[in-house]
Image: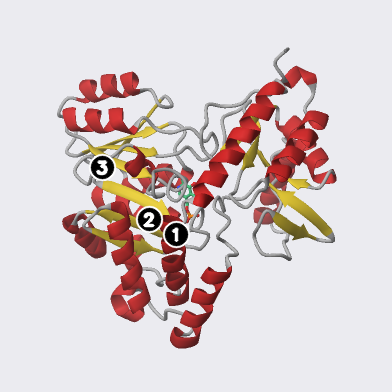
Amino acid sequence: MSPFEISLEAALIEREQMQRYRQRMTLTSPQSTRVRVGDKDLLSFASNDYLGLANHPDIITAFQQAAETRGVGSGASHLVCGHSDYHHQLEEALAKFTGRDRALLFSTGYMANLGVISAFVNRKDTIWEDKWNHASLLDAAHLSRAKLKRFRHNDCSMLERELLKDGSNSNRRFIVVDGVFSMDGDLAPLTKLSTLAEQHDAILMVDDAHGFGVLGEHGGGCAQLCKLNQQQLPLLVGTLGKAFGTFGAFVAGSNTVIESLIQLARPYIYTTALPPAVAAASLKSLSLLQSESWRREQLHARIAQFRDGAEAMGLHLMDSTTPIQPLLVGHDADVLAIAKQLNDKGFMVGAIRPPTVPEGTARLRITFSAGHSEEDVARLLLALDQVIPSDLRRHL
Ligand SMILES: *Cc1c(COP(=O)(O)O)cnc(C)c1O
């Protein structure tokens, strides 16, 4: 081994000793509430496919038909020659869906966040981010070289004090949050944040990766739920790989914002466009997600069923009304052991450890889908009752 590899090996061993080693499972089934891993069938409560659309027959057909007529690869970036009619139609449909002038597709949510922040924020600016924001938002702030300030989770008073303290030192000021926090499932106080942004001359950006499709009357996410228009929330990011069940991401905003991103956002300019068939699949998914609200109703009924059952068992639930329902465990080794026991019983549940979450807050990340039946949730509750030790419960 080279000295380089020896040092890498040492770091890998250290990670393993800390119970932080991450491993991939290889699925041989579609993404669904039932998945096959190796020779085992598992009931999954781990994916972000909240509406059960990732394997929907109409979306598969839309994908196949577009692949028949447009092929597979998009061939280039959007600005060179990779922008197809399907991309264009999807952008128009997303603009209408979000009530914005326009929407712009990105290849992933990670890149959309890097794109927006690196395009609009620079060294003379300050960016305030919630401590629990998604990694891509923090990485984006580093890329922008702006002054990054992280405020305590959902603490608007701390943010306000910081904004006041900053005075007019910064050129532009940005407030950036997740709409739904991905490892906790709680919501950002968007109404309050938009008021703060207005009062303190800051620009609000929300990454609503987990809200679109799930929240709001027609699945329009946090912005729809809190009724925030384009002026109040000028930079709105959504992803297509979660409730939409497909792949990709978008930014929705004013004509000027979108036109500026096309000119300036390097993760937009210097990357190959999504395959057109993926855009066609997302178009179908968007139409199902808007018109068939029974999926959202079913999903929220399952979430309520889980919370009632878990409450009755004395489990410590978090303050979440979304499909992300974490159970706090604490130690990394403990969460791994519990996830392993659940796996032995035929369940797939995510064991989330630092650095994804703060030290000492390792957790089971249980997620729900409209594809889960009442019986699926009952089975999960029964299994949790068997594997969650009493010291992790309230005494009833
Ligand atoms: C998943 C996620 C992203 C990244 O989106 P991808 O399309 O998977 O790259 C960004 N932000 C949040 C909050 C997410 O949960």
Residue 175 percent across, percent down from the top left:
29, 36
Given residues 202 and 249, the one toward you in this image is 249
Cβ–Cβ under 8 Å for marks 2 and 1:
yes
Q: Which residue: 25% across, 42% down?
A: 233
Disc 3: which residue: 233
Whole-angstrom CA distance, mark 2 to mark 1, is: 6 Å
Between 121 and 8, the residue placed more toward the observer is: 121
At label 3, which amino acid type do we have?
Leu
Q: In this view, does 284 lie above or below 41?
A: below
Which residue is label 1 attached to? 108
Residue depicted at 71% across the width and 65% down the height? 29
State whether residue 102 appears in this view: yes
- Give the CA distance from mark 1 to mark 3: 21 Å
| Mark 1 C-beta to ligand 1 under 8 Å | yes
Nearer the observer, disc 2 or disc 3?
Answer: 3
Residue 37 lies, in percent from the top left, at: 77, 58
Q: Which of marks 2 and 3 is nearer the N terminus?
A: 2
Q: Quadrant of residue 389?
A: top right
Give the number of the disc on residue 112: 2
Q: Where is residue 345 shown, x and y percent of the image? A: 84, 43
Looking at mark 2, is its residue's CB closer than 8 Å to ligand 1?
yes
Nearest to the observer: residue 70 or residue 323: 323
Q: Is residue 17 toward the left or the right of residue 253 in the image?
A: right
Amino acid at pointer 2: Ala
Quadrant occupied by the C terminus: top right
What residue is drawn where x is 68% and y is 55%? 5
Disc 1 residue crowd, few under 14, some 14–19, many 20+, Cα 10 Å: many
